[in-house]
Image (cartoon, rainbow, N blue to C red):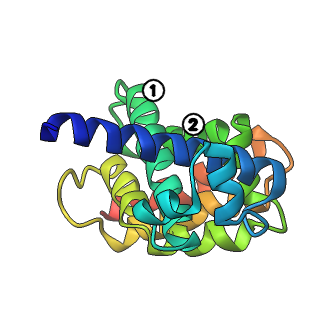
Amino acid sequence: MTSWLRDERTDAAVERILDAAGHLFAERGVAETGMAEVARAAGCSRATVYRYFDNRQALRQAFVHREARRLGAAVTEQVAAVADPAERIVAAMLAAVHAVRADPLLIAWFTPANAGFAGDIGQSSAVIEAMAGHFLGAHGAEPPPLARWLTRVIVSLLTVPGRDADEERAMLEEFVAPLLSRV
């Protein structure tokens, strides 16, 4: 077997497992989803799931990283034309919050029963920090501490939303945008 075929099959298997996991996270909850259920939903054995993911935490993190990359690309495209850094970060944060809320596979992470998982991964995820760093202009560099804080603000808005979109925008414009003048 050629290596390109094996790599393609591996990618397809990982995607299928992550897709199945995402649907189960939304249906059952992050904490309630086990490796056996993911294997059944993906149409493979538990051994196959464990071949690609050492444990549930690794599976959860891989799912979040995949979705963060996808979300980051979409948000980057949405805010590319915004020249002012403060306006761009507010627009990016609001776009990220809106996209997560609109996706049942993602918003499931921010229900009261699952929010702890999102917070843990959000604080320990290099992918998510890099996404926030990208919006700050730290392309390829290690994300600054401000990127980690912005990630926490997004997680906060998802777990404890404002009264409406206008209030959330006003909070970001008042409390987040001024910080960018210091960077």
Q: Name the residue located 54 percent from the left edge and 48 percent from the top edge.
A: 18
User: On the picture, is 178 further left or further right than 28?
Assistant: left
> Which quadrant of the figure has residue 179?
bottom left
Q: Is residue 85 visible?
A: yes
Circle 2 is placed at which residue position?
Answer: 95
C-alpha gap between disc 1 and disc 2: 8 Å
Percent of width and height locating residue 52:
41, 60
Percent of width and height locating residue 95:
57, 37
The kind of residue on which mark 2 rests is: Ala
Q: Name the residue located 79 percent from the left edge and 61 percent from the top edge.
A: 160
Of all residues, the one furthest to the left in this rendering is 2
Q: Name the residue located 62 percent from the left edge and 54 percent from the top edge.
A: 39
The 10 Å Cα crowd at callout 1, few under 14, some 14 to 19, many 20 or more, is some
In the displayed structure, would residue 73 be above or below residue 181?
Answer: above
The kind of residue on which mark 1 rests is: Gln
Q: Which mark is residue 78?
A: 1
Residues at circles 1 and 2 in contact by the CB criterion of under 8 Å: yes
